[in-house]
Amino acid sequence: MRIDEDDGSSGSLLERGVRRLEWARDHMPVLAGVRERLIREGTLMGVRIGMALHVEAKTGMLALSLEEAGAQVSLASCNPLSTDDSVSVALREHFGLATYACRGETEEDYYSHLNSVLDLAPQVAVDDGGDLVTLLHTTRTDLLDGVWGGCEETTTGIVRLKAMEKDGALKYPVIDVNDAKMKHLFDNRYGTGQSTLEGIMVGTNLLLAGRRMVVAGYGWCGRGIAMRAKGMGARVTVTEVDPVRAIEALLDGMDVAPMDEAIAEADFLVTVTGCSGVVRPEHFRVAKDGIVVASAGHFDIELGLAGLADIAEEERQVRDDVTRYVLADGRRIDVLAQGRLVNLAVGQGHPVEIMDMSFAIQALAVEHIVKNRDTLAPGVHPVPRAIDEMVAWAALEANGVDVDRLTDAQCAYLASWKEGT
Ligand code: ADE
């Protein structure tokens, strides 16, 4: 069953959404600690926060946490196909949170929802992928003076923001949540690793063991997908354009090949590069018959689906989330979720414990903007190290794990340069 369907056996959409949010609340202890402190200290009281994130249960908990801490929150989706409708309905109707998102929304509705978020005149703009910040800097420029700052969740958004910064176009400070260690090391690697395989498995119900999976891109997300696919018994080939990452993949035990060679052997192919046109008609023409193709990148630009449609003789739906393209020679190419990020469009997004850490960073980054709004200059700013460490200690505690502390003698040794052989 798809997550946005209501089979009648487990209550209404709204009830299911409330349960999903409560489940997330039960498994997000790090965010809970941040929330309780923010409520106590009142830093966010009355602050207007506009958010464009994937609208599902963990995101809902971030939004509710900020609202419980006194902020006024407005939430839209950052992708037309990633919304969990049960959560969207529950946030709006049960929790009274201004939520504008529905799975499968048209591009027009998508932008109208982002505009509804901006109608709040947010002082803090929390973004995933950079569409909210772009809208603010193009059509809603009248609001820019009132924005204290923003946060960006993902690699794709950071790439766009850095391009804006380089052009001198970025008008407010943005905290680069993606590059916090407690975000990308775990969210991008273990989160994307697990949720992408979940999306592929739920979408196809096919076996991974013994099959060849091509992973295009060996950044943190690609490393996670490749590692988990290998763990499931798949034989993994990595494609890369960066020679260092290609060597890393090789030494991690992956096969490495260019796309035209890799795709010819592939049972599954997943792109996670952040770049457009990774798989093109010349690749599809030599793909293995029956290949399952998906993307876990933020935008649906990695698989050249328009090019595939051009060379296909036939296109039809063969499962809920699978579109089959048949080429002139009879070769079948099965595309998951229209090339949209498979881990959220088919799967349920990253595991709760992963988003607990990522969204604790987000909440602390919002607090950082509010507290430092008078001194932060426009531009992209790293997450302060103290925030990363705070979340790491809280996550260790949540996992029931303690670690050693340096002794005074060890601190003195590390601070000195005279001691040697
Ligand atoms: N759930 C909420 N935001 C997410 C993201 N950026 N990636 C995966 N799962 C998510």
Image (cartoon, grey):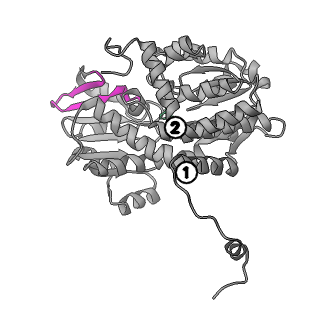
* Image: magenta residue range: 320-340
Task: State which quarter of the image contains the N terminus.
Answer: top left
Residue with the most extreme front position? 400
The residue lying at 56 percent from left, 38 percent from top is 29
Callout 1 amino acid: Leu
Check if residue 174 falls in the magenta segment. Answer: no
For the question of whether residue 117 can be seen, the reply is: yes
Residue 98: image quadrant is top right
Horizontally, residue 59 falls left or right of residue 137, namely left
Residue with the most extreme bottom position? 421
Horizontally, residue 419 falls left or right of residue 349, namely right
Check if residue 321 falls in the magenta segment. Answer: yes
For label 2, the SS is: helix
Q: How far from the left and from the top, in percent, is residue 295?
A: 38, 35
Residue 355's tag is 2
The residue lying at 71 percent from left, 28 percent from top is 124
For label 1, the SS is: helix
For the residues carrying marks 2 and 1, which lies nearer the camera in this image? 1
The answer to whether the beta carbon of the residue marked 2 is less than 8 Å from any atom of ligand 1 is yes
Q: How far from the left and from the top, in percent, is residue 139?
A: 67, 18
Callout 2 amino acid: Met
Residue 396's tag is 1
